[in-house]
Image: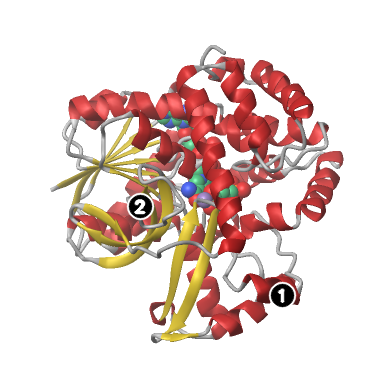
């Protein structure tokens, strides 16, 4: 039977994942699910782990659920390892959001200085996990959901020899589902050709039953109600002339780059009112865990859909199933570029539509990105590479370089002020700089 290990098992997303394994049990016979967490997450792990057990019992499936703080014991002979952890929990996220905003710079979980620091905290942990994997389950696939997923995948590709790694984000599947809903067709009929980077991905074309509907979808993106496909970012709509000229589908995170002022203004307003996304999520999470505690609850509660990561389980479990079953279907994931996008280094991670095989994702080569988007994608890739280097080396100058070349940071001086404050604020979770 299949052994799955989920690191960060105390996450409120775990019931989604469990629901996914239950729904696909007929094609993906999981025997053991090990949920791993750390001391700080023990209470969450217990609550969510017991809900997982009730869900599986209700489904009548022979999946054993193990809850543990011993990562190495869990990893022994695993087939798939999924990661969904948050170093420093939501308090660290609040700092990632608030410190940049206090300097008048966008504060966001995966973008700008916040994304840099989430990477600096996360990458050393991921590299440790890879060491354990190489020793205890060298043939296991690592499916990484931990943000910043693109930068984390980049770090694994460039600083380890483990090649069985896939980075996963719910944004592409969210776009496909969202487009299907707008067009009032079933999701299975919609296909988007994705290419770019994590949270910097474009839809180069979109089809219903093989016929391009790109022009129609682009018009729909001018409506604020249709322009975001995730719950954590509010849509603002695109200027019709701009989006027509861009002529590709955007992802919600593009708003931070093409609507920087408007997005910053909104975030600053939330900041002044004391509620950046971390506080909103804290409240949501408290509500969810109250529900999870109920011994009569044995399904994933619908309230989980208020989180930005909706459809994560679908994305994760269909990916694992397609690797396991060598399905060769097409899914957008983060994987090694290998020339699929000409203007991105061969050895770098890209988010792109891939054929999913037993040997892993095979990217569908696109030639190159349209010239209007190519430069921004390259700049973000440079940021991710320099940031990953800073996380691995602990070099201060490299961290400042990453900070300053990020398009959302206005100058080296402001970057340095933010860097110094964040290094101090996060020091218990960071390598030595
Ligand atoms: P969370 O705050 O609930 O954290 C999940 C768990 O990780 C906690 O129980 C915590 O104790 C545990 N943890 C922290 N450090 C750990 C370590 N070193 N080893 C093992 N466990 C550890 O987080 P969440 O809101 O559920 O999100 C989890 C992760 O998933 C975050 O990194 C988040 O950014 C990411 N995420 C990614 C996407 C995506 O599109 N890829 C979408 C949503 C969330
Ligand atoms: C999004 C993304 C994630 C992001 C998350 C935030 O859709 O794909 O990478 O971090 O949702 O959601 P949250 O509910 O935690 O703000
Ligand atoms: Mn994401």
Q: How many marks?
A: 2
Give me the residue at 26% from left, 40% from top: 163
Give the label, 2 or 1, closer to the camera: 1
Nearer-the-camera pick, 425 or 106: 106
Residue at the far top in the pictured view = 432
Nearer-the-camera pick, 361 or 267: 361
Does 278 appear above or below 170?
above
Q: Which mark is residue 294?
A: none
Give the percent coordinates (x, y) of residue 324: 19, 55
Question: Looking at the image, what colour scheme do you see?
Answer: secondary structure
Residue at the far left in the pictured view = 1
| Residue matched to label 2 | 18
| Residue matched to label 1 | 222
User: In the figure, is residue 410 to the left or right of 205?
Assistant: right
Quadrant position of residue 84 = top left
Secondary structure category for the residue under label 1 = loop
Give me the residue at 57% from left, 62% from top: 371
Secondary structure category for the residue under label 2 = helix
Give the percent coordinates (x, y) of residue 418: 73, 26
Tell me the quarter of the image containing the C terminus: top right
Does 427 appear above or below 72?
above
Give the percent coordinates (x, y) of residue 200: 55, 54
């Amino acid at each position: 039977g299949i052994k799955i290990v989920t690191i960060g098992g105390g996450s409120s997303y775990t019931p989604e994942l469990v629901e996914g394994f239950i729904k696909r049990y007929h094609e993906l016979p999981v025997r053991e699910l090990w949920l791993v967490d750390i001391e700080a997450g023990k209470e969450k792990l217990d609550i969510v782990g017991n809900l997982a057990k009730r869900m599986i019992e209700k489904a009548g499936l022979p999946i054993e659920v193990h809850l543990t703080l011993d990562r190495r014991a869990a990893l022994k002979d695993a087939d798939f390892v999924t990661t969904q952890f948050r170093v420093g929990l939501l308090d660290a996220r609040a700092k990632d959001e608030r410190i940049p905003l206090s300097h008048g710079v966008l504060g966001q979980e995966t973008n700008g200085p916040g994304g840099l620091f989430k990477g600096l905290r996360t990458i050393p942990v991921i590299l440790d996990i890879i060491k354990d994997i190489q020793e205890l389950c060298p043939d296991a696939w690592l499916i990484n959901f931990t943000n910043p997923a693109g930068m984390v995948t980049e770090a694994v590709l460039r600083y380890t020899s483990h090649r069985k790694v896939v980075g996963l984000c719910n944004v592409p599947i969210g776009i496909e589902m969202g487009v299907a809903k707008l067009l009032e067709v079933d999701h299975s009929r919609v296909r988007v050709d994705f290419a770019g980077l994590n949270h910097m991905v474009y839809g180069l074309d979109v089809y219903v039953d093989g016929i391009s509907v790109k022009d129609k979808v682009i018009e729909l993106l001018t409506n604020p109600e249709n322009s975001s496909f995730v719950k954590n970012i509010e849509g603002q709509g695109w200027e019709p002339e701009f989006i027509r000229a861009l002529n590709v589908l955007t992802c919600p995170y593009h708003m931070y780059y093409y609507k920087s002022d408007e997005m910053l203004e909104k975030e600053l307003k939330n900041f002044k009112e004391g509620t950046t996304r971390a506080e909103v999520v804290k409240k949501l999470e408290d509500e969810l865990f109250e529900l999870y505690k109920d011994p009569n609850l044995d399904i994933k509660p619908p309230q989980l859909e208020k989180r930005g990561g909706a459809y994560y389980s679908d994305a994760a479990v269909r990916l694992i199933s397609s690797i396991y079953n060598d399905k060769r279907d097409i899914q957008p994931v983060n994987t090694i570029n290998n020339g699929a996008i000409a203007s991105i280094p061969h050895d770098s991670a890209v988010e792109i539509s891939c054929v999913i095989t037993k040997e892993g994702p095979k990217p569908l080569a696109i030639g190159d990105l349209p010239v209007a988007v190519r430069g921004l994608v390259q700049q973000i890739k440079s940021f991710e590479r320099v940031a990953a280097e800073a996380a691995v080396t602990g070099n201060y100058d490299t961290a400042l370089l990453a900070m300053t070349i990020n398009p959302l940071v206005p100058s080296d001086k402001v970057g340095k002020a933010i860097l110094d404050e964040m290094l101090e604020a996060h020091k218990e979770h960071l390598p030595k700089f």
